[in-house]
């Protein structure tokens, strides 16, 4: 609390909690974005929320009975494997405090724009080809247009490998 001379009011300054959102998928650029966002979250003392959006390959008809189909369940497990691989690639087997991960069903564009509301920063990865005169992909374009917080785009170094999906994990 600060009191200004000659002023009867006090201004209360309180540290607000910051949240950094990082959208990930199965790419080296995505892994680079997660690593950058993790370092930035540590610097800002912010929480980090990792989001992997996925869509079912087949859309149900609006009149179809709701429920988890076999195909949809398999796709969800595949998306969980991708998210787990990205997290393992960045953190190994132990996720640090202040980091959460979310598997969200829906288009990446819609999910990330929604999650950006109230966030301090949205971080995405892009292939180097997007910086070589080629247009950005649809997710980046949608987030550039509609995100409700600042957007940072991280590229991977040439030749960087994507995270390995479906590798055995030792549990003790």
Image: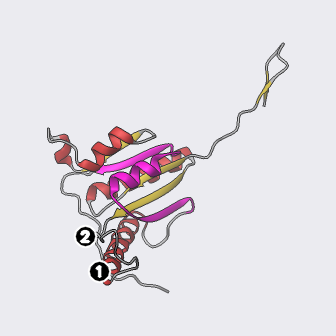
Residue 4: x and y, percent? Answer: 79, 19
Q: Residue at x 82, y 16 (%)?
A: 7
Callout 1 environment at 10 Å: few (<14), some (14 to 19), or many (20+)?
A: few
SS for tag 1?
helix
**Which of the 4 image quadrants contains residue 90?**
bottom left
Per the rendering, the mark at residue 71 is 1
Where disc 2 sits, the SS reads loop
Quick one: which residue is furthest to the left in this view? Answer: 133
Q: Is residue 54 left or right of residue 149?
A: left
Q: Is residue 40 left or right of residue 63?
A: right
Q: Is residue 157 positioned above or below 141 on the image?
A: below
Residue bearing the label numbered 2: 57
Locate the N terminus and report the quarter of the image it occupies.
top right
Inter-mark Cα distance, 1 to 2: 9 Å
In percent of width and height, residue 167 lies at: 31, 79
Residue reaching furthest to the front:
63
């Amino acid at each position: 609390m600060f009191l200004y001379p000659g002023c009867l009011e006090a201004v209360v300054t309180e540290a607000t909690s910051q949240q950094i959102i990082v959208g990930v998928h199965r790419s080296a650029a995505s892994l680079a974005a997660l690593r950058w966002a993790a370092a930035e979250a540590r610097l800002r003392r912010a929480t980090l929320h990792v989001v992997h959006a996925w869509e079912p390959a087949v859309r149900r008809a609006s009149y179809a009975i709701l429920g988890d189909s076999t195909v949809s369940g398999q796709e969800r497990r595949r998306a969980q494997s991708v998210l787990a691989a990205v997290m393992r690639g960045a953190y190994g087997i132990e996720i640090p405090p202040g980091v959460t991960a979310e598997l969200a069903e829906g288009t990446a564009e819609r999910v990330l724009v929604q999650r950006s509301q109230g966030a301090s920063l949205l971080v995405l990865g892009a292939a180097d080809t997007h910086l070589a005169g080629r247009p950005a992909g649809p997710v980046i374009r949608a987030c550039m247009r509609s995100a409700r917080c600042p957007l940072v785009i991280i590229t991977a170094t040439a030749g960087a490998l994507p995270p390995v999906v479906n590798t055995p994990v030792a549990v003790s």
